[in-house]
Image: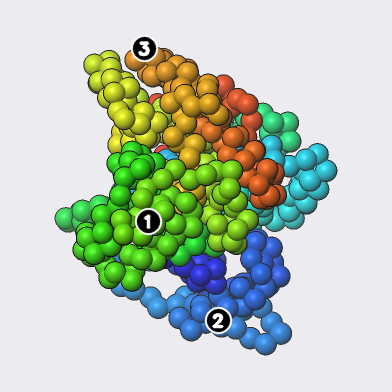
Amino acid sequence: MAASLTRPAQLAETLRQEIQTGRLVPGQKLMSIQDLSQVYQVSVRTVREALALLQQSGYLQCRPRRRALILSGPVPQTAQLIEQTLRQRDQFCDGYRAIQRLLPLLLWQSRLMMNKNEFHDFFRYNRKIVRRKSDHSWQLSSVLFHGLLNYSGNPLFLDLYRVLEQQCLIPIIPGVPHPYEVLARNPQNRDFSLLLQDLQDLHFSALQEKIGRMIENIQKTVSPYLQNLSAAVSDLPEPVFHFHWQTGSAFHTQTKSRLIAQQLILDILNGKLLPDTILPSEKALAAQWNVSVDTLRRSLHYLRQLQFIQTINGKGSLICSPDLNRLNPLTSPEIRQNSLTYLQALQLLCLLCVPAAQDAAATLHAAELEAAVSATLNAPHPPTALLDFLLTHQSSPTMEAILRQVLQLIYAGSPYLYHARKLPGGPVTPNVGCLLNQALDALRQSQIPAYAQSIYQCFLLLFRESRAFLIQTGVSEAQRLQLPDTLPLTVFSKTHPEFREFPNSLSDAKIRQRS
């Protein structure tokens, strides 16, 4: 995984895209530093550093004791903008679809994390914002969606939503009516008021319906916009798809030695490297990974700290199972952070597995479903095979990339992947094997809702055991994270046919920027 951007660089990139897409209008004043700090949940110092970066690149004019003035920045050629936009047309489509499927789940989960007093204050504040901001939907959604997702206690929720949101921003092309300008003519404060009411009443089905209505509104404006751009060129450029989720400070920078160590741990947990066997020599492993012996030794030192290997003089490194009773996540701040990252990623995976499971089974015939079930049951590690099935059968490249990166974040907490060894029916998780069989039986019979629900229960059990283990060993931050026993039934219903066609537009009305 590429190294994550710093917080100031992330905020500068976000504001730069806001300016390029017209959501922040050149010639107007930017929000105050304090407001930016509140909206984006960063420190005042981070905001100042981000504004300095934007001033250097020509997007802002910072003035003493006054709010920064928004500038247009370097202006690319119109032909280049059109070509870039058309290359990303599939990326826009897939980003809209991903947010349409994930945003209701994330909002609903964040709502459940808030106690009565917290939501009362949140509700009152946002009602005031809705009345005061009128149709300024960029500020409405910044306060509502970002604020609510931040209450979840899981920074991965907010980071993921921000990256998906940026993926769906459409540049302004001179001379072509922009969809955001069209949408800005219709005030959106009523939509946000209804969303707030549904969140207060925990009406998840109504929440999904209203977000779907937002998607339809944007669909009516985005599609003609892209058609106008397509008519302006003779040969359409090939579409380009790229999604990389920058997870910010929630994930430590991965050095080569750490990546090698994590892969070795994964091989041990998957059974590729068996306990009570000797690892190849340091020189052989260094040649295999194309690194120096010193780098390889740092990797083995990390494995030794986590008790996955034991050095025996004259023989080498013996692979062993870690003594979980002695392994304490408080031994170092880094292990503590990685353990919390693991739990946060597992919580997100529990929510993602439902739409991912439905998508993976939606396009397969009965014979293909039977083959997938047989392959999973006959695999050395059925849960890993099930995750591979979810990854390889996603119709959405964005969802596949998100799932893959969530799993990488889970591997960052590799000491706690000991749960994976017990999934087939170990003493700690006796019910997971049963839930896994229920999921596969439902998949074989094409009972998609029951299949998705069983997968959710399987990962829910794993999440709760991991959370209990971390709380017991002193990671008090894990107490904030939790999941409900069951998800709303509407989550397990089949996807509406009208949402499976482009543009499956962005469900967040935040992109409805005023002209």
Nearer the N terminus, badge 2 or badge 3? 2
Residue at which label 3 appears: 445
What is the crowding at mark 2: few (fewer than 14 residues within 10 Å), some, or many (at least 20)? some
Which is nearer the eye, 469 or 149?
Answer: 469
The spot of residue 44 in percent (x, y) is: 67, 73
Side of 476 relative to 340 (left or right): right
The spot of residue 15 in percent (x, y) is: 52, 67
Nearer the N terminus, badge 1 or badge 2? 2
| Label 2 – label 3 distance at C-alpha | 59 Å
Q: Residue at x 55, y 72 (%)?
A: 8
The spot of residue 514 in percent (x, y) is: 56, 58
Q: Residue at x 37, y 56 (%)?
A: 312
The amino acid sitting under disc 2 is Ala
Quarter-of-image position of residue 467? top right
Q: Is 314 drawn above or below residue 488 in the view shown?
A: below
Marks 2,3: beta carbons within 8 A: no
* Whether residue 494 can be seen here: no
Q: Secondary structure at mark 3?
A: loop
Residue at which label 1 appears: 312
Mark 2 or 3: the one toward you:
3
Residue at which label 2 appears: 52
Q: Secondary structure at mark 1?
A: strand
Marks 1,2: beta carbons within 8 A: no
| Label 3 – label 1 distance at C-alpha | 52 Å
